[in-house]
Image: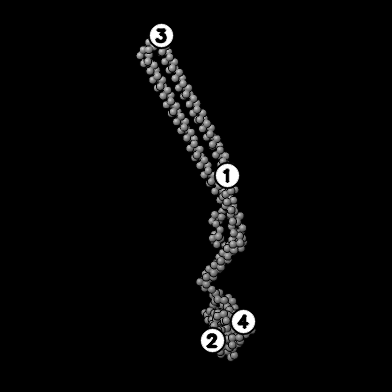
Amino acid sequence: MRQFTDAAGRTAWVDANGMVFTEGGTRPTYYNVNDWNERQIKKYGSSGSSGGSSGNIPSVSAWFGNNTEAYRKYKEGKAQGKWKDINDYISKGGTKTGMVERPKSPEEYAQAIIDSQEKLIQEETNFLKDYLAKNPFAFDELLAKQSATEEYTPYYTELLNDYIEDINVKRQTIEDDKRLSEYLSERSAEKTSREYEQAIASAEEGFAGSGMFFSGIKDRTGGLLNIEKTGELADIATKEDYAQRGYGRQLGVLDTAEERQRRDIEREKEAAIAGGIETRRGEAMKGYYTPLTESYYRRFPTSSGSTLKGYVPDSYLMY
């Protein structure tokens, strides 16, 4: 309950709901402040009127009396169009000591909260825009790639070299086996040829000793031996050809394995370099946005941070 002086210069009391009481605040009038002031002026005239006749309203300056500050604010408000005259002033809660603030309606309270939030959001937005404009984020991705490449290349180069060394050992073993097979095949063919030549020579000596050197039997025997020789040499050549093709396939498998390993290691290296770039980007973001968020929350300690989300990357907020 608050005491005030009404438009007629009489003492009254107003509660939190804007309702007027008299007799020390114990008797309700069932008027609000505006209606009560109008009633009092009509009944008693304004404070300072002569004779107290109803409806006889003196000059505005006389009504305000010694309350020069209230009178000044009344004139300013009238010039600004807040009220048309003294009656309009009184109807809006004005008294000779100044305006009486009436309780706000639920709608006005809600609007005041909305206005306050909008004002805060605008202040936060202006702060963030100004900070980002003066301190733009800069990240040298080319330099980060160079740094990550220097970090990961030695490891993946060593990994590839170790693999190639193992492959080369296997490849050399196959090459040695291949050359050995060729050598043994050649020796086998030479041995077979010598054995048949010796057999033919022995047969010819036998036929010469028996006087049949120029007989048809000798020629037939020599021909059969040559046929057997040719067949065995062909078998040796066929086996060697098959063996050489087998060695070739083994070398081909090693070549394919090396090619795939080179490809896979290169992919792993590129992925590692990309990850290294993002790691460096995250470190740069942390170094940039941490001071920003700290400054933001120092400036707006009660903020929910919703405005900040529009200006700071989600990846940093998650961090």
Q: How many numbered marks have been drawn onto this rendered protein structure?
A: 4
CA separation in Å, label 2 and label 3: 174 Å
CA separation in Å, label 4 and label 3: 162 Å
Residue type, label 1: Tyr
The residue pinned by badge 4 equals 72
Q: Name, please, the residue furthest toward the left.
A: 216
Q: Which mark is residue 209?
A: 3
Residue type, label 3: Gly
Nearer to us of marks 3 and 1 is: 3
The residue pinned by badge 2 equals 42
Q: Which mark is residue 7?
A: none
Q: Residue at x 58, y 91 (%)?
A: 51
Indicate the quadrant where residue 134 lies. Answer: bottom right
CA separation in Å, label 2 and label 1: 94 Å
Q: Residue at x 41, y 20 (%)?
A: 229
The residue pinned by badge 1 equals 152
Front residue of 87/256: it is 256
Front residue of 48/200: it is 200
CA separation in Å, label 3 and label 1: 85 Å
Q: Earlier in the sequence, mark 2 or mark 1?
A: 2
Q: Is residue 24 above or below residue 49?
A: above
Q: Name, please, the residue furthest toward the top.
A: 210
Label 4, residues with CA under 10 Å away: few <14, some 14-19, many ≥20: some
Q: Earlier in the sequence, mark 1 or mark 4?
A: 4
Spot occupied by residue 144 in the image (x, y as percentages of width and height): 58, 50
| Residue 55 visible in the shown view | yes
Q: Earlier in the sequence, mark 3 or mark 1?
A: 1
Nearer to us of marks 4 and 3 is: 3
Q: Earlier in the sequence, mark 2 or mark 4?
A: 2
Q: Which part of the image, by quadrant, shows the N terminus?
A: bottom right
